[in-house]
Image: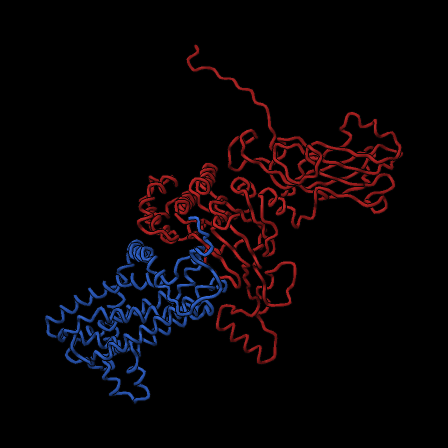
Chain colours: A red, B blue
Amino acid sequence: MQEKDIILRVEGLSKQYRLGVIGTGTISHDLNRWWHKIRGKEDPYTRIGERNKRNTVGTSNYVWAIKDISFDVRQGEVLGIIGKNGAGKSTLLKILSKVTMPTQGLIRSKGRIASLLEVGTGFHPELTGKENIFLNGAILGMTKAEIKSKFDEIVEFAGVQRYVDTPVKRYSSGMKVRLAFAVAAHLEPEILVVDEVLAVGDAEFQKKAIGKMQDIAKGEGRTVLFVSHDMDAIQKLTQRTVVLADGEVIFDGDTDKAIQAYLSQGLDTKPYHEWESLETAPGNDFGRLKSAAIRDEKGELCNRFSVRDDIYVNVEYWDLNTEYNNTAIIHVINERGQRLFASNEFNAPDWLDFHDKTKGIVTATCKIPRHFLAEGQFSLLVAVGNYNPEIIHAIEDNLLSFEIFDDTTGDGVRGSYAGKWPGIVRPMLSWKIKKEPLDSK
Amino acid sequence: MDKPQKHIWLFEISPKSNLLDFKFKEIWQYRDLLMLFVRRDVVTLYKQTVLGPLWYLIQPLLTSVIFTLVFNGIADIQTGTVNAFLFNLAGITIWNYFAECLKATSDTFKKNENIFGKVYFPRVIMPLSITVSNLLKFGIQVLIFTAFYIFFASQGKAGDLSPFLLLLPLIVLIMGLLGLGLGMIISSMVTKYRDLTFLVQFGIQLMMYVSAVMYPMAIVTQKLPSYVSWIVEYNPLARVIESFRYMVFQEGEFSLQYIFITLAISVIIFLFGLIIFNKTERNFIDTV
């Protein structure tokens, strides 16, 4: 990265929040605290806000919302910023947009930074669309002349030509969002900060918004910092992504890898699990699990698939059953806890060839076909048992997990439709079409 | 541009700040926003309710009537040749501008928490725009006052206009600066102590009684011992109101020296408020 290409440099940025004894709002609280103090009693308000840093109970009253964050952004780059709730994304954005100041560190910029407002912030319901465009634009740092020159473009982009002179309170929420986005997208700042805005609006508008952001970055050479929970949008828009966790940068680089890093952090389950020995493995004298794995078609471990990828689930177990025929069982459960399906090894036509009541290590592989599961997070239950009579020897719920995403490249079930696709499965079904001309008598 | 551009940064964000940096340049850059906020306030004032703008007529008139009944009727305060009602209306008109500015700016941070939390612009634009748009309400009230002035003047009960009336803009400026300055100080404190808002309402009321709104200043020194009367005598607000009445009635005390002293005081309060306000704006979103 060349020095002169860098438009924004963040150096050692930290922000500290004070917990506990900050002014909790009212003089009466402070007086009460003082009254408790002179009587030697415990401060009645200390506990307020202590939940902030989730898993660790801090010994000090200070918490670093972000700590020592550094990165450079090049001119014209679309940089993704991802991280779980509480990872420090909002704090970073607030500092970038000058809403609050850092405790330490430095941000240097060669361009104006503007952030995209959330739905209609700064809109006044009594004012007309036109008046709000001017007001909103000015809030975002445009001059009146700048807004005037862009006015027609903004109105057209938002698709509200008919309602420019209507008070915004009569707008639908979608129209408000479109208008807000349109104003911000036509800003002239060198650096635009976008936070979760694509989560709203209908599919058509989302597509338009993504296109506009690509134009902004590629065509107009402006820089965009894009913060989102939506991995699809991040993937579509950015090449480089910074991953934040607990206020620190844990990954900075290629977006695909960043998403991997983001998804794998803190997940209890992995695409692979193996038990060390027969003794420690779950099960009984008839069968014990040895390992389980989720692989892609090349046989590599993988926990993130496109809807158009085949998914292979490996179950390896010690088959110790000399009375009945063992079978591996998997259940696939989606993020809402719905059990999508169960599948058994005995569906294999040659199942009996491998189960002749002798001991051994069985490796059974199930293929979950492409164009079947919808996008989302899935967990796997893995078990070994036998039917007739039904006995489960080993069962491990939530053992592995994987994610499926859907990109709108056009050849999937959803075609190039970018909106929300309904249904808990997404099978590619065959359609037959017939059409008769109207004037065929 | 082949030269290395290492040091060409447009701006920096860092924890350090200069306390005496008033950011006047930045405020100037955002002047369009200031005017748009003023426009918003003015337009929405009319759009809100039927009674909205009417309220600005009713409130001073009713207050003047009551003051006349209580202070001039019952307490028998003399207002010289000037009609008592007109005398009170003059005081209330000028007082209201200050009070409205103070009231509206004193919860700037709390009221705009939402928008301040999302986007940056010099925060001081907000109270500044309130002070400017309140000029409209002040204008309405001045019109009423003028109407009554003409009416009472035709009956010879309105004293005489003084040539010093030309200094009226200065009087308005002083009231605006005082209201804005105090409002900024209070709004900064409100971010920490929310219950101060209630104190503001009460405080403004109390202040009115020591600001010579409904009595001539001379009466204070006459009737009250000096350990109490100094509150009114050294109160810049009282001076301003008394001066305004001199301008329109040629009654009471007036001196250019006082005007300039109060102007200096109000500028100092305004700058002090601006410093506190700018300091608060940096981190207030963390404590609100």
Up/down of A204 relative to A138, above or below: above
Extreme residue in the front direction: B3
For the C terminus of chain A, the image quarter is top left
Q: Of all residues shown, which one is farthest toward the top?
A: A441
User: Which quadrant of the view contains residue A413?
Assistant: top right
Residue A415 vs residue A340, the one in the foreground: A415
In the image, taking residue A393 as reference, residue B44 lies left or right, namely: left
Seen at 29% across and 77% down, the residue is: B236
Q: Nearer the viewer, residue B62 or B89?
A: B89
Percent position (x, y) of residue A342?
A: 71, 35
Q: Is residue B45 visible?
A: no
Residue A406 visible somewhere in the drawing: yes
The front one of A402 and A323 is: A402
Asked if residue B65 is positioned above or below residue A303 in the image, the reply reads below
Count of marks placed on residues: 0
Q: Residue at x 51, y 48 (%)?
A: A2
Residue A312 position in % (x across, y down): 70, 34
Q: Position of residue A364 (x, y in %)?
A: 77, 33
Compare residues A298 and A330 and report the one nearer the observer. A298
Left or right relative to B117: residue A291: right
Measured from the top left, where is residue B122 in percent x and y?
39, 60
From the viewer's perspective, is B138 left or right of A42? left
